[in-house]
Image (cartoon, rainbow, N blue to C red):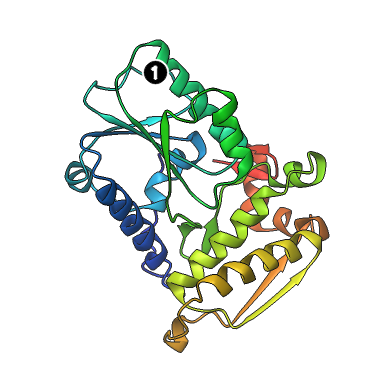
Amino acid sequence: MTHACSLEKSSFSLNLVREAATDALRRVLGSLNLGDIELFVEPRLLSLFHHAMSLSGEDLTVLRVREIHSLASPSAPPMPTSTVVYIVRPQTTHVQLVAQHLLQQLRGASSSSSVVLHTGTWNALCADVLSRAGVGNQVAVHPFQLGFIPTDNDMLTLAHDTLLRDCYIQNNKTTLTELGHALHVLQQTTGDIPTVHYKGELAKAVWKSLSEFNAASPPPSSRPKKLRIDHMIILDRKLDYIAPLSTPLTYKSQKTKAWFHAFVFF
């Protein structure tokens, strides 16, 4: 896990986004009263765990979190008295990791109970993965309000490394709903963004999803003008492949680091 930016110089108080995610995890774990917990986090989210939430060792102790594991790595069986809590994004590839891990637990005759905390919106495809694996009744599913993850003072990410491939090649656009949900969570934290423009088919789908979430639960409108986001433009990446390749950071990184689905890994 990388060291997280403090976000103290953020023009839009992105530290509020991190605090909101931290509070959301505290609330959901506290409300479920799970006892001792072992967290299994999907690998990409785990790499950004400290960016997403500000939890100290003392905080984890209070929440009774014994260990935090990568869901993709082999690990020792959880303690018999611990509750296994999975944190994943609602995509079939991630839920398949949960199903595989649950099957391993069942084969090992583990008596630990299991809970899935999903970011975004749970969908029928995810439920079907658990059902087909025969573990749908072995795990409780609950929402966890984690939207965008702040990685720097002016940078947010959902860390969807395969979004373009999923949408344009596999024709799987379920992640667009999660993008709309993440924007909704952002507005619930930082205040309403009064003007939203979009360009492109996928951007329109994100805008429609955002509008539906906002209609069901309107974001607060009162924010200091200095910290308020007045305008937002949603663009399909398909409309502009050049811009992300033209920044000094990306150009310099290209010389020494690897590309992966339009991302540069440090």
Image spot of residue 106 (x, y percent): 40, 16
Determine the residue positioned at 33% across, 55% down.
Answer: 22
Residue 257 visible from this viewpoint: no
Viewer-side residue, 116 vs 227 = 116
The residue carrying mark 1 is 105
The vertical placement of 204 against 136, above or below, is: below
The vertical placement of 112 against 158, above or below, is: above
Determine the residue positioned at 42% across, 87% down.
Answer: 224
Residue 18 sits in which quadrant? bottom left
Q: Quadrant for the C terminus, please.
A: top right
Q: How many marks?
A: 1
Q: Is residue 4 left or right of residue 243?
A: left
Q: Secondary structure at mark 1?
A: helix
Label 1 packing within 10 angstroms: few (<14), some (14-19), many (20+): some
Image spot of residue 118 (x, y percent): 47, 45
The vertical placement of 182 against 138, above or below, is: below
Image spot of residue 43 (x, y percent): 49, 34
The residue under label 1 is which amino acid type?
Gln
Determine the residue positioned at 70% across, 56% down.
Answer: 244
Q: Is residue 123 left or right of residue 153?
A: right
Determine the residue positioned at 41% across, 43% down.
Answer: 2
Residue 177 visible from this viewpoint: yes
The vertical placement of 173 against 188, above or below, is: above
Q: Is residue 51 left or right of residue 175?
A: left
Residue sticking out furthest to the top: 108
Q: Quadrant for the N terminus, please.
A: top left
Image spot of residue 48 (x, y percent): 45, 45
Residue sticking out furthest to the front: 137
